[in-house]
Image (spheres, coloured by chain):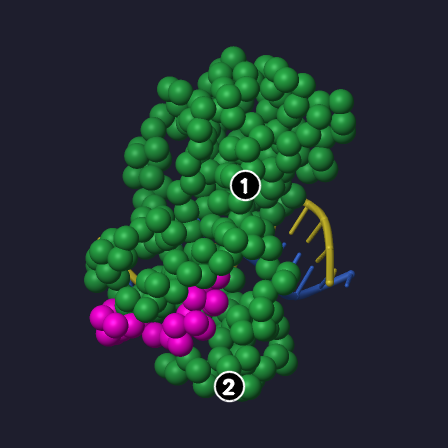
Chain colours: A green, B blue, C yellow
Amino acid sequence: MPELPEVETFKRYLDKTSLKQVIKEIRVTDNRILNTEEKRLIKALVGKRFESSIRHGKYLLVDISPQFLVMHFGMSGDLEYYNNKDEPPKFSKVIFQFNNGFNLAYISIRMFGKVSIVNSIEEFIENKKLGPDAYKMSFEEFHEAVQRRSAIAKNALLNQSFIAGVGNIYSDEILFRTKIHPKTNINSLSDNKVKELYDNIIEVLEFGIRKKGDLSSYPNEFLIPHRKKEEKCPICNSEITRIEISGRHGFFCPSCQKE
DNA sequence: AGCGATGTTCGCCG
DNA sequence: TCGGCGAACATCGC
């Protein structure tokens, strides 16, 4: 599920439900999900509170001063706040139990996510080599990132050290809206096109956040409802084409998005 | 019932 | 050194 819009939705959910409550206990159901020692996680969290959270790209960082809890949701992560009296949600991997009788479950079906503890946000971003957050970046930051790199557009958007937060589905949508072929080298784009690309990154992500990351009910003029075989481009009625790039598959309109 | 999947990482190669 | 590629990771759903 989680590209930037969904992680932003998780962030808002966590902020709404789980801030400022004292953490009583941590339950780790499967410690393969941890990127840190279980002891260290427990020591860092028990008795602390989630003070605030920030999202960078697809990562959610929670201030448990002096450290930060980091959650990444892989391809199948979720958060659920529920009453301690109830059964934990299926596939819960880490459960944060608060003093008020409610729990926050970190859920991961396929174990691709990770939970860890870091000392500072700056250090974390540095270690992971993350680029600027795709939703919060300024045009200047984006322009600079484009100039610094040579890569085909689809790979650039997917590369978290270029910009952080865009995944496979939204990258297709962004390139479709900007009418860029996925294999176009980003450093061959005109200044106008770079600006247009930037605007569309923000707009597509903004729309995704408004939709709470739910892809199931997009308007026809977006590519998202047409990301499957034998679909027609909503703009020009050409056949939507599937392409494989670096082991990921993407969809595009060969007529609107010329190489 | 095999294949694909909204992600990241690592090693190989040009 | 960088970018493209493919495999590996784990497991469920189509």
Q: Are marks 1 and 2 on the same chain?
A: yes
Q: Using a 10 Å C-alpha cutoff, classify the residue at mark 2 as few (fewer than 14 neighbours), some (14 to 19) or many (20 or more).
A: few
Q: Which segment did they paint magenta?
A: A170-193
Q: Residue at x 63, y 81 (%)?
A: A230
Instruction: Assign the magenta stretch its main secondary structure.
Output: helix
Question: Label 1: chain?
Answer: A
Q: Which residue in the rendered view is the most extreme toward the top?
A: A47
In-image side of A36 versus C13 (left or right): left
Residue A160 part of the magenta-drawn span:
no
Residue under pointer 1: A10
In the rendered image, residue A32, in percent from the top left (x then y), is placed at: 58, 33
In the rendered image, residue A257, in percent from the top left (x then y), is placed at: 42, 80
Q: Residue at x 53, y 44 (%)?
A: A9
Question: Label 2: chain?
Answer: A
The amino acid on which the numbered mark 2 sits, given as a three-letter code, is Cys
Q: Residue at x 54, y 41 (%)?
A: A10
Q: Please say if C1 is above or below A94.
A: below
SS at circle 1? helix
- Which label sits on residue A199? none
In-image side of A199 versus A253 (left or right): left
Quadrant of image for the C terminus of chain A: bottom left
Residue under pointer 2: A236
